[in-house]
Structures are given as C-alpha cells and as structure tokens.
Amino acid sequence: TEVTEKLEEVVIIWTKQIRQVLVESEQIRREADDVGPSAELEHWKSRMSSFNSLLDEIKSSRVKKIICILQAARSKTLKQWKEL
C-alpha cells in the first residue's frame, strides 16, 4: 500500500542516517598536536550525545509503531533495519 511504501522510505532514511553515525564513530580522529585534553573530552561528550539521541529516537513509540506496521506488512526493508 501507499502507507507502507511511505513508511519504508522513512526506515530507509533512518538506516542511512544510523549507518553514517556509525561510520563517523569508527573514523580515526586527526587533530593538531597542540590540542589538549579538554578538546578530547569535548569530542567524546559530543559523540556520546549523538549516540544517546540516536538511541532515544530508536526507542521512541513512533519508531516502534512504524516497525510493527512494517512487520505486519512483511516489509523487506526491515532486513536492513535489523542488520544495524
């Protein structure tokens, strides 16, 4: 149905965004030698904030409802979601 297709598009976008965050988190940080521990701490606080926001969104009732609807529709898009 049209609704299912729209929800699949949303899940595809989420999947791409999550993968991007994961790829960024695995990249080696390069910075100048004169950067001190406070910059390092700020970097990791920012990373933690990104991950926490991502987890909050994934756990939200809106996401859970969309996933349930797509499960009921036997959407193949969920395979990508589950691989995350």
Image (cartoon, rainbow, N blue to C red):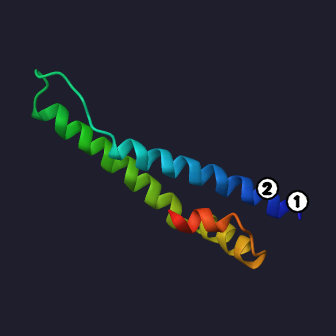
Q: Is residue 19 above or below residue 55?
A: above
Q: Are marks 2 and 1 in contact (CB under 8 Å)?
A: yes
Residue tagged by mark 1? 2
Q: Amino acid at mark 2?
A: Lys
Horizontal placement of 20 versus 4: left or right? left
Q: Amino acid at mark 1?
A: Glu
Mark 1: which secondary structure? helix
Which quadrant of the figure contains the N terminus?
Answer: bottom right
Q: Residue at x 52, y 58 (%)?
A: 57
Q: Residue furthest bottom?
A: 72
Residue tagged by mark 2? 6
Front in this rendered view, residue 19 or 48:
19
Q: Residue furthest right?
A: 1
Q: Residue at x 10, y 29 (%)?
A: 36
Q: Image quarter for residue 44?
A: top left
Residue 39 image offset from top left, x and y in percent = 18, 31
Horizontal placement of 17 versus 13: left or right? left
Crowding near the residue tagged with mark 2, few <14, some 14–19, many ≥20 C-alpha atoms within 10 Å: few
